[in-house]
Image (cartoon, rainbow, N blue to C red):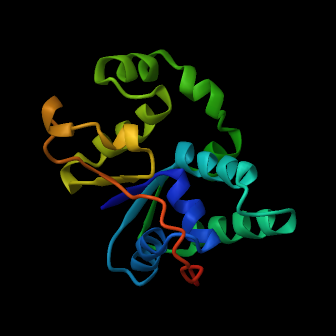
Amino acid sequence: MRILDSNLWVFAFTGTNRRAANFVEDAISRETEIVLDAYIVNEVLEAFERSTLLRGEETSEAMSHFLKLVRVTAVIVQDFTEAERYEYDLARERQREHNKLLGQILDIQTKDAPILLLASKYYNASPTVYTNDEEFAEFEPTAHDLPNIGIEYVPDTNEAAPLPEL
């Protein structure tokens, strides 16, 4: 089971990182599961809006394509309801005491705590978090008695990749 951080979704849907695109293609072809929750979905949408890789209508199209993929791909596990997605407040979530505390205890950024909590929810499925954040990728789950959780850094490659197709 895979969990992709928001930048990897943006890279996949802008065709700028072959490995990120491959993760999504693997899910479309049912080779592996990707799990996401309302936090990640909203983080992805926010990342699309601030991305310099897209302009104007391209941004809206990429967001729509992403949301359509999430809804229709059976192996993308949606750990949220549509209502949760629309009502979600990223800033408020990042300021929740449990996320701040988890960030402090584990020496990770508060914004990454919800991603790690999602991974812990699927602990028995041995999830791996794939991230473009070098600092987050330095986190060692086994050092915190979390051997079933993996984390892997996926660097920027600017290697062109086809956009995911449904």
Residue 75 placement: quadrant: bottom left
Q: Measuring 47% from the left and 75% from the top, which residue is drawn there? A: 18
Residue 115, placed above or below residue 113:
below
Residue 102, placed above or below residue 165:
above
Q: Position of residue 43 (x, y in %)?
A: 60, 45
Residue 48 placement: quadrant: bottom right
Q: Quadrant of the C terminus?
A: bottom right
Q: Is residue 106 left or right of residue 80?
A: left
Labels in figure, total: 0
Residue 62, placed above or below residue 100:
below
Q: Position of residue 159 (x, y in %)?
A: 51, 75
Residue 127 placement: quadrant: bottom left
Q: Measuring 39% from the left and 58% from the top, which residue is drawn there? A: 154
Q: Position of residue 9 (x, y in %)?
A: 54, 61
Q: Measuring 38% from the left and 39% from the top, which residue is drawn there? A: 136
Q: Quadrant of the N terminus?
A: bottom left
